[in-house]
Image: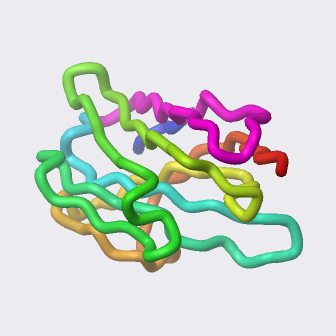
């Protein structure tokens, strides 16, 4: 089992940046692919980005391409989401998740086995 804890959320003005972190504990983090999802009030949880265990392959939602970058440091058992040029519509609770297939970069949230508790990101206009 993998335990995930997100951090780095906060309040930022439109056009600003935030870097989210996901700290993993339990089983070896490099055995898992990692994803980021978000859920805005009144909306369903949606896919943001995912990355393979090597960090060499990533997948992004169209809405965040060229603005967000997913990465990981297996030596630190950590994953990251660098968010630039933030927009008010990026406001949501952001969750990191781990997938048992280390090469998975899909967007189906029901495919991910482990989840963090989430961190709030609020972008003001």
Figure coloring: rainbow
Q: Nearer the viewer, residue 92 or 12?
A: 12
Find residue 122 and report its horizontal and vertical position in percent: 79, 45
Q: Residue furthest right?
A: 42
Q: Is residue 19 magenta?
A: yes
Q: Is residue 106 above or below residue 68?
A: below
Horizontal arrangement in the rendering, residue 29 relative to residue 115 (left or right): left
Q: Is residue 20 magenta?
A: yes
Find residue 24 and report its horizontal and vertical position in percent: 42, 32
Chain part drawn in magenta:
5-27
Predominant SS of the magenta segment:
strand
Horizontal arrangement in the rendering, residue 53 relative to residue 12 (left or right): left
Q: Is residue 120 above or below residue 60?
A: above
Q: Residue furthest top?
A: 76
Q: Is residue 107 above or below residue 125?
A: below
Question: Which residue is rendered at x = 24% and y = 68% of the image?
Answer: 104
Question: Which residue is rendered at x = 46% and y = 29% of the image?
Answer: 23
Question: Which residue is rendered at x = 68% and y = 58% of the image?
Answer: 90
Q: Nearer the viewer, residue 31 or 16?
A: 16
Find residue 12 and report its horizontal and vertical position in percent: 74, 36
Horizontal arrangement in the rendering, residue 90 relative to residue 106 (left or right): right
Q: Quadrant of the N terminus?
A: top left
Please count the marks in the image. Answer: 0
Question: Which residue is rendered at x = 25% and y = 29% of the image?
Answer: 73
Q: Toward which corner of the image does residue 43 lie, by quadrant?
A: bottom right
Q: Nearer the viewer, residue 110 or 81?
A: 81
């Amino acid at each position: 089992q993998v335990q995930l804890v997100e951090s780095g959320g906060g309040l930022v003005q439109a056009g600003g940046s935030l870097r989210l972190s996901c700290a993993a504990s339990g089983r070896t983090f490099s055995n898992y692919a990692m994803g980021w999802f978000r859920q805005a009030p009144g909306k369903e949880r949606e896919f943001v980005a995912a990355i393979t265990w090597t960090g060499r392959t990533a997948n992004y939602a169209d809405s965040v391409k060229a603005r967000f970058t997913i990465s990981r440091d297996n030596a630190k058992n950590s994953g990251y989401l660098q968010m630039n040029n933030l927009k008010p519509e990026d406001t949501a609770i952001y969750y990191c998740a781990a997938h048992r297939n280390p090469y998975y970069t899909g967007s189906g949230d029901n495919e991910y086995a482990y989840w963090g508790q989430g961190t709030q990101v609020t972008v003001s206009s």
